[in-house]
């Protein structure tokens, strides 16, 4: 791989980390608040006060009404017959998709997508980013172990209505 590609990739990752470290939290249209920790992970709290575990990665996507319905259906159904699921994927240099389950595994933030996999094929995908922006939908996920088994938890959230930045020190 060309050396200048590796340098640009590292610079882009560093830019993303620096931007995320300026953000304290963001709020969705339905009142959920997502707070960032020191490792660029989010933790969601519903307006009712219910709190969730820290997520391994959170991305943001611009979905039109039909796309939102498609992703919502795949999120809710998690079809065991077709294997329909939502994944965060990073497009590799050979255009193959690599499933990303943790922000630490991102190599190039400009090549992230939110995708629906049906019958083991990436059937539908939409450009995703790591930086929250007003009007974009939130998607977060985490992996965890319970009773010796590995599980995945995914959540398709609502549009962002407000971003709160940390106060300058």
Image (cartoon, rainbow, N blue to C red):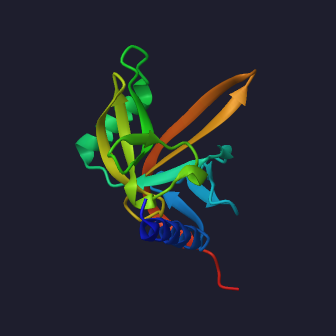
- In the foreground, 159 or 49: 159
Q: Is residue 140 above or below residue 34?
A: above
Decide if residue 80 is on the left or right side of residue 118.
right
- On screen, residue 121 above or below 109: above
Position of residue 106 measured from the top left corner of the image (x, y, whole percent):
52, 53
Residues 158 and 117: in front is: 117
Residue 54, given in percent of the width and then of the height, sits at 67, 48
Name which residue lies at 31% across and 48% down. Answer: 126
Instruction: Indicate the quadrant where residue 108 lies.
Output: bottom left
Q: Which residue is drawn at the image coordinates 48% and 66% (left, top)? A: 162
Q: Residue furthest front?
A: 2
Outermost residue, bottom side: 169
Query: How many numbered marks appear?
Result: 0
Q: Quadrant of the N terminus?
A: bottom left
Which quarter of the image is occupied by the C terminus? Answer: bottom right
The residue lying at 67 percent from left, 34 percent from top is: 144
Q: Quadrant of residue 146?
A: top right
Residue 140: % across, % down:
52, 46
Q: Nearer the viewer, residue 150 or 13?
A: 13
Position above or below: 61 against 165 = above
> Extreme top residue here?
81
- Examine the image and state in which quarter residue 110 appears: bottom left
Residue 158 lies left or right of residue 66; in this view the side is: right
Residue under the image location 31 percent in, 43 percent down: 125
The image shows residue 60, relative to residue 74, as above or below, that is below
């Amino acid at each position: 791989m060309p050396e200048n590609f590796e340098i640009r990739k590292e610079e882009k990752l560093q830019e993303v980390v620096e931007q995320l470290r300026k953000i304290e939290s963001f709020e969705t249209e339905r009142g959920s608040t997502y707070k960032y920790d020191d490792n660029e992970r989010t933790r969601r709290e519903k307006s009712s006060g219910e709190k969730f575990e820290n997520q391994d990665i959170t991305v943001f996507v611009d979905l039109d009404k039909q796309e939102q319905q498609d992703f919502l259906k795949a999120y809710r159904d998690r079809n065991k017959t077709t294997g329909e699921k939502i994944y965060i994927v990073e497009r590799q240099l050979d255009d193959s998709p690599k499933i990303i389950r943790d922000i630490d595994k991102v190599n190039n933030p400009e090549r992230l997508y939110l995708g629906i996999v049906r019958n083991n094929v990436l059937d539908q995908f939409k450009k995703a980013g790591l930086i929250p922006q007003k009007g974009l939908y939130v998607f977060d996920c985490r992996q965890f172990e319970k009773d010796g088994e590995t599980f995945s938890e995914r959540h398709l959230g609502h549009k962002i209505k407000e971003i709160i930045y940390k106060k300058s020190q």
